Amino acid sequence: MILKSLKLTHFRNHIDSTFDFSDGINCIVGKNGAGKTNLLDAIYYLSFTKSAVGSTDRITINHEYDFFTLFGSYDGLTVALQFEKGKPKIAKIDGQEPDKLRKVIGRIPLVIVLPDDTSMIREGSEERRKFFDGALSQINDVYLEMLLDYNRLLKQRNSLLKDNIGMPIDRKLVEVYDDQLIPLSVKISQHRSEIITAFLPFLQKNYTDLHNLGEQPGLEFKTQVTQTFKEEFKANFKKDQIMQRTLLGCHKDDFLFVLNDRAIKKFGSQGQQKTFIISLKLALYDFLHHQTGKKPLLLLDDIFDKLDDSRIELLVELLGEKRFGQVFITDAREDRSRQLFTNKKVNFIEIAG
């Protein structure tokens, strides 16, 4: 996919901005706070209908206004997104509004690398699940629907457990949730387990490309959803009551990141962790391309500030390969980017702020 142009209205610090892009590497330069990351976030919004860096839509609206709009023109389609305070978010593809907002997801494959992505290693399992759920959702709309249904049912079941503390709970009502959550848990965990096999070769190749010193990255999947999951789930009801939440299910799944058969969270250096995460994101790019036949958009935010010189040189060489399509890179140091890409065709976009 190629993003030809993008118009932002009242989006963060972009009051009325229009940008034109090339079909190769686009380097967005400007001082810190100028709005470089905001531009990447707007591109991300058009693929996922939500922010990559903010928790709510409201905070993406410029504080002087009540709404924002985004309009992207791609090769073959247009995508528009609007959010106004107090109203549902609206998306349009080629001028037509889909019956469900989630129908936008997967139309424009995208991978983003952010400065704090190593938190995926350091933090709990939610961030790692989110990464692989995002990968699966971009290639399988049925999986996305199952995941949304599961999260909705889980929230309702947890509310029932919490609201009825110290009081009898209608077991038949709980069983209505259980009978839906259990098969969804099984299917979701199965998809998550299967992605490891398809994903791992891409991770290993990209890690070697960035750090060819014989280290071997790996992935492991941990889940409670075994062959006896249905019986264990139902037998755990009293514990759920006491803790006021659902203790078993695919919402407890985890993906473990390993390097040379050891947990990278415990034994990996900062350099190894950074290399692992960037390799993971580039592996996602290759995985999506392999699965969909489309080259995703690749967004790299302040990537050069997080790597040493040798890894920067290797990454720049990788980005020049034909396997990558359209790339967006932000850098507060224009001179550095111009020097790194001296021998490559790059479209430089300066944001004054």
Image (cartoon, rainbow, N blue to C red):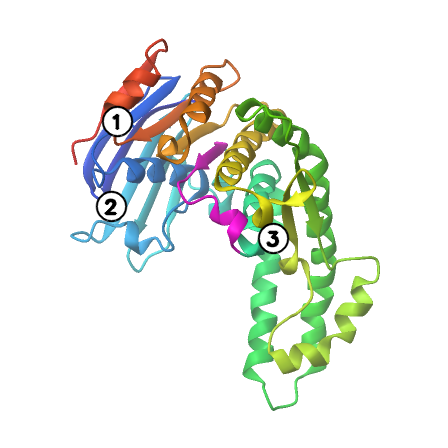
| Amino acid, disc 1 | Phe
Question: Toward which corner of the image does residue 220 lie, by quadrant?
Answer: top right
Dot 1: what SS?
Answer: strand
**In x, y percent, where is residue 68?**
26, 46
* Residue that mark 2 sits on: 12
Q: What amino acid type should be assigned to the residue bearing mark 3?
A: Leu
Residue 147 sits inside the magenta stretch: no
What is the C-alpha distance between the residues marked 1 and 3? Answer: 35 Å
Give the residue pinned by disc 3: 147
Asked if the residue under mark 3 is in contact with the one under mark 1, i.e. CB atoms within 8 Å, the reply is no
Which disc number belongs to residue 19?
1
Mark in the foreground, 3 or 2: 2
Q: Is residue 118 magenta?
A: yes
Which image quadrant is residue 164 in? bottom right
**x 42%, y 26%: residue:** 77
User: Is tag 3's residue or tag 2's residue first in the polypeptide sequence?
Assistant: 2
Query: Closest to the observer: 184 or 301?
Result: 301
Q: Which residue is drawn at 39% across and 32% down?
A: 303
Which quarter of the image is occupied by the C terminus? top left
For marks 1 and 3 on the same chain, the one whose residue lies earlier in the sequence:
1
Dot 3 falls on a residue whose secondary structure is helix
Instruction: Point out the stretch of residues depicted in magenta.
Output: 108-123
Earlier along the polypeptide chain: callout 2 or callout 1?
Answer: 2
Identify the image quadrant of residue 97. Answer: top left
Residue situated in front as seen by the camera: 38 or 309: 309
Mark 1 nearby-residue class (10 Å; few <14, some 14–19, many ≥20): few
**Tag 2: Cα neighbours inside 10 Å, few (<14), some, or many (≥20)?**
many
